[in-house]
Image (spheres, grey):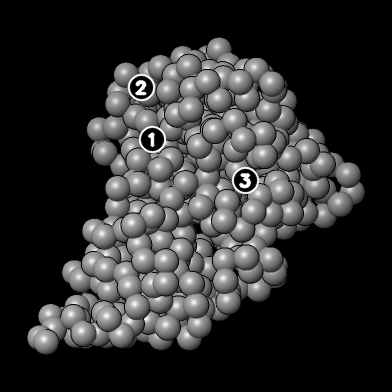
Amino acid sequence: MSTQPCQLLIFGAAEIVSWDSQAPSAADSVVVVDGKIAELGQEADLRQRWSPLAEVDAAGGLVAPGFIDAHVHPVFAVGRAEEFDWRAQGMDYLEIAARGGGILSTVQHVRATDPEDLFDTVCTHLRRMRRHGTTSMEGKSGYGLSTQDELKSLQVLAQAGAAVGMEVFPTFLGAHMFPLEYRDNQEAYLDLLCNEMLPAVKEQGIARAADIFIEQGAFSVAQARRYCERAIELGFKLRIHADQFHQLGGVELAVELGAESVDHLEALSDAGLEAMAISGKTYAGFLPTAPHFLRQKENAPARKLIQAGVPYFLATDFNPGSSYTPSLPEAAHFGRIRLNMTAEEVLFGITLGAAGSLGLEQRKGHLRRGADADLVVLDLPDLFHFGYAFGENPLSQLICKGDVVPF
């Protein structure tokens, strides 16, 4: 029997999580052709039909789709480690911001950093993410808060993604916080966002979505409505931070405006949960490492949302002030502990769930025929072990578009 060449054969898996109901249940191998998934099956059968140019031995590990981090703030110049001590002394998120820390501290550093140095730093952040299995990400700006510095941030993000080989789906977050120079004139900053910043980002084509932080000390629901309606008018998708600390109605607004996702939800109201359940379209973004990092007792009501049929994803919220981890396996562990999610639910949340929230479910987040051949091989004997351990990296092999990637 003649064979045909293939780019890669991954064999020897103890278990393959493909999210494909048509895949053979006993499959232990994956065939890749031209950067796409071609077939799943048993090694002996596949070798009769395919002649691989390269091979990866999964060595009895778990094979899954490459991880997708659907909520990341990677464009920052320095960390905020000192604030970690401030939290130990009892200061909360808003007190730290009032003291000159928080988001505005990061803004000062981003503004002062030239694009070349910022590029180097962001590349380092993306490489840290990749070392833990992330193959694609949604990346936000939001630490520039001026037209010039927000454009700089988005340009650097695109350049870093290309340099590292990370597929990036950019989001404009100019409405992260009011900058110091507009603290006493919020309407003027809203004017700047709606009349200059959003159009400039759209003209350059460097963001697919717009985001806003709806919270006390940040943006009100009324301000968010104006910003979001302008973003929709310009053709942006919406991804919204809401109900992190207080119930202000941001979730209901997100659902009303057809946002792709509304993220955090630690303070989700019953009305917000009902709105998301009725809609069934706006994804819940679970970010369990953030309340852990911030020493909050409250968690997003993941079990209620999942049981209500709300689509969801799980993400790191990687940023310098409230979730300084680039590791989706670590986020999965806290999803299992703090959100009472199962191993299957957290893995779904960082693969097909994340892809769905970004409109990528046709080609990413699963191992169906024709999907992008982004895969991870994990040093785990089965799915139940995913998120079981913490403080260690289960990644043993990383494949992007069918090529084995060093990490």
Q: Amino acid under label 2? A: Ile
For the N terminus, give its image quadrant: bottom left
Task: Left or right? Give the position of 89 relative to 390.
Answer: right
- Asked if residue 176 shows in the view, the reply is no
Q: Is residue 250 above or below residue 32?
A: above
Distance from disc 1 to disc 3, alpha carbons, whole Å, reads 19 Å
Q: Earlier in the sequence, mark 1 or mark 3?
A: 1
Q: Name the residue beneath numbered marker 1.
A: 209
Residue drawn at point x = 38 percent, y = 35 percent? 209
- Number of the front mark, 1 or 3: 3
Q: Quick one: label 2, few (<14), some, or many (20+) residues within 10 Å?
A: some
In percent of width and height, residue 403 lies at: 30, 75
Q: Earlier in the sequence, mark 2 or mark 1?
A: 1
Q: Secondary structure at mark 3?
A: loop
Q: Residue at x 22, y 77 (%)?
A: 7
Q: Pointer 2: what residue?
A: 232
Tell me the CA gap for discs 3 and 2: 25 Å
Q: Mark 3 or mark 2, which is nearer to you?
A: 3
345 is higher (above) or lower (below) than 182: below
Residue position marked by numbered label 3 in the rendering: 287
